[in-house]
Amino acid sequence: MPPAFVFVVAGTYLLSGIAAPLIRRPRLSRVVGFGGCAVASFLGLTLTLVGSLQRGPLRLPLPAPVPWAASELYLDGLSAFFLVLVFLVGFFASVYAVGYMREFDKHRRGQAAPLLFSLLLLSMGLVVSAGDMLSFLLGWEGMSLSSYFLVVLEHEKAEARRAGLIYLIATHIGTGGILVAFLSLEQHTGSFSFNAFARVPIADPAILAATFGFALLGFGTKAGMFPFHIWLPYAHPEAPSPVSAIMSGVMIKMGVYGIVRFLFFLLPAPPPSFGGILILLGLLSGVFGVLYAIAQHDVKRLLAFHSVENIGIILVGIGAASLCLAAGQLGPARLLLAGGLFHSLNHALFKGLLFLGGGAVFQGTHTRNIEKMGGLMRRMPLTGLTFLFGSLAISAVPPLNGFASEFAIYRGLWDAAGKGGSFPGLLIAAMAGLALIGGLAFVCFVKVVGTVFLGNARSPSAAASRDPRMTMTFPMGGLAFLCLALGVFPSVALDPLLNLVPFAVPSPPVSVLPEGGKLAAVAAALAFIIGCLVLLRFALLRRNGKRDHGTWACGFAYSTPRMQYTATSFADPVLHVFRGVLRPRSVREERLSGRFLLEMRYETHIRDLFENGLYLPIYRLFLRLAFLARRLHTGHIHLYLGYILGTVVILLVLFH
Amino acid sequence: MNTLTVLLLLLGIHLAVSERIRPAIRSLAAQGFLLGLLPLLDSSGGGWRAAALCVATIGVKSVAIPAILTRAVSRLDIGQESESLISTKTTILLTGALTLSAFLACTRFGLSGKDQLAAAAGLTLLFSGLLTMTTRVKAVSQVIGFVVLENGIFLLGAASGSEFTLPIELGIFLDLFVAVFLMGILMFKIQRAFTHMDVRKIHMLKD
């Protein structure tokens, strides 16, 4: 896109963000703020899509933030792809926020939300289009801070403050890692520019590994990669739903962007072990993410754990691509990287959709606990239908987009393992792991959709819920349509992705996914058949009418909503199978009268293995050290003066 | 110059080991007077400036501060003894050790002749002032320690070769004067609030 348009888009974001807090009337402020973000995102999306058709990267010098280094925007194919991600989900989330943020109208801080939201989108745009380290870090910090303030928007809640604190610490540890990695590159090139970094000649394998390790710490923390994921299930649910959609759909992809940028653009010929590590961490993220998700009762926390899972799938794709590249298998490498990036796009779409749906459910029922929902499909048909689309997509069911991208990754893994690259065992294990993840994700969403949308309402507030207004249903519908469209026509996104992959391609550049055409045909046929069945059902219902009857209640005189199968019971068998790693703690209380059971309570709780096993001990160690240091702090003035005397003498005598 | 420095050093050691408050205040006044003579001896240029500095130094350090302290001692009725947390013997040994380490440290400053001696004396005063503040129980003694410490810094500054600039020195005097003045007021307050002057017991104020 031409340089002037960059300023138009950024200016629209900034203007609408700044205007919102200045407008006194909450309603108008909300419409101007979020509406402006929607307009800017739409503008940006159009310009990026049109602009990315022309060849060659766009370079745009920026005013230098510091005197000693120049700064520029550098937009290549990879940047354009991630910009599409930001603008696309940003557009739908902004429209949704116009309606959703109405409940914040009574608070003055509701008017700060549009400013923070536009800054979040704008800084993510800066992250992916930055051409040098300084503007990248500027965007990165802007993104982290604006999202932090959005997480603690409801700061009267203690959970929100705690989640915000955990997020703030995690994200700054991550930024530290990125800074070290960038400075290591700067040491070898003497420049802050990514173009100078490109294929930087780091000869020492130890330094190369350390650089990659710090980059992985930084970007992996933001992406929610295992074991740096613990902030994610706290922070994402506490933010308002459109913000959760942005954070889960787009912001964690900034970590993916960073890893891809590092691994395929900046580091010189990474050894195969880097790819292997990524595959392993990806598999861990995927399996643990989905297992913890199954154990959740909070719908937004459950979705947040699924983000960890999907990041795992994406990392498997990217890691395998790096592995194949190191082994010289260019064909599978292209397919795997394109598949990983395609899954990033798809995850942004369906996770955005699911979080928006979750927000609609939350506003309808005033609870996030899925055990208190039920029967929402009849009361919120639009929300229910779009949520079903999102659930099918995230469970990788054809003909939706989640299947298409996972298929590309499977296909790439198969090709690579079949042609005997390095670590074929790892590639086959990755395939098996992906299959396990997919199956468990399906279980999880059967649980969610079954508990939330089917059956009868489990609480009065669930019984009183209704579909939200147009501004909220339209984005959900739009995202659901895109999930279906990309599932039926995957080549729309996959072909450009195959061509933006930076490494040399074997000529001629054929379509690397041989089944691409067939896949589309099968998906279209499936969509057609399902459509026909739905029409048939409508026709039959119209002819025969609909009759309501009570269901058979196992011989009981009447049935209550409490007799329904609960989400906890549904999840229990899976958790039981994996009890070795999950270590669920269950509480079971029974009250008996003779032989008859009067009352029974059963609860299961699962706590994060890494949170308890790794981070809590570290935290306790620091706490103990702090208490030791506190002993120096007695309150006796003489002792403090003695410390000063001792320090002065030691400094002057020993270290002069 | 060297005689002056040695006298200052001896007065400093006397201050560090003296057990009674009033002689310590007199030593402090004498030290301030000697310090006031220092710019006159050192004057390499700007006679009126050195004279002004001399007058200011003697006025603050040798007249005003000792007067405030004497008045505090008589008004507060706290007796003659400046109680110490450690015995006089230990204080003497510690002062010796600190003097030795000050002279050791000064060998690395890259100064020579009388400057090195002055720097070592300044450092000794600094150390012994801190030691007084650390070990003495009564708040008045701690003010004395603070002034000795400041005198040490003054001497160290004089020895390091940079010439005295009037505005900076006057600013320091003002700070010192205000500090001692405030400490005087605070001592009255402490006396009234706790009916004693024992700094050991102030730790009860800790949260």
Image: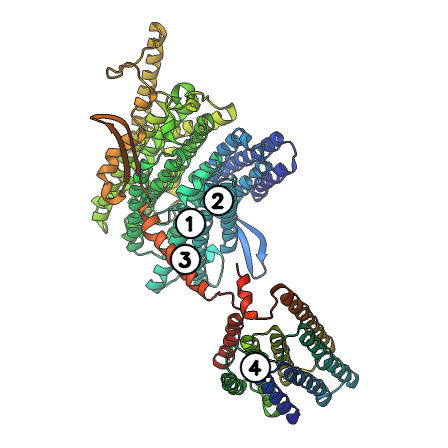
Q: Mark 3: which secondary structure?
A: helix
Task: Give the mark, 3 or 1, whose residue is nearer the N terminus.
Answer: 1
Amino acid type at image mark 4: Ser
**Please, which chain is the residue tagged with disc 3 on?**
A
Does the image show residue A201?
Answer: yes
> Label 2, on which residue?
A161
Q: Can you give x and y, in whole percent of width and height, for residue A590 in the image?
A: 26, 31
Q: Answer whether labels 3 and 1 touch (C-beta < 8 Å).
A: no
Task: Give the mark, 3 or 2, whose residue is nearer the N terminus.
Answer: 2
Mark 1 vs mark 4: give the one in front: 4
Mark 3 vs mark 1: give the one in front: 3
Which of the 4 quarters of the picture holds residue A458? top left
Amino acid type at image mark 1: Gly
Cα gap from disc 3 to disc 2, whole angstroms: 20 Å
Q: Which mark is residue A96?
A: none
**Please, which chain is the residue tagged with disc 4 on?**
B
Count residues near mark 1 (Cα–Cα under 10 Å), then give few for <14, some for 14-19, many for 20+. Answer: many
**Left of A449 or right of it: where is A469?**
right
Mark 3 vs mark 2: give the one in front: 3
Mark 2 vs mark 4: give the one in front: 4
Q: Are the numbered discs 3 and 2 placed on the same chain, yes or no?
A: yes
Q: Which mark is residue B128?
A: 4
Q: Can you give x and y, in whole percent of width and height, for residue B80 in the image?
A: 62, 80
Q: Answer whether labels 1 and 2 touch (C-beta < 8 Å).
A: no
Q: Are the numbered discs 1 and 4 placed on the same chain, yes or no?
A: no
Which of the 4 quarters of the picture holds residue A623? bottom left
**Left of A395 or right of it: where is B61?**
right
Count residues near mark 4 (Cα–Cα under 10 Å), then give few for <14, some for 14-19, many for 20+. Answer: many
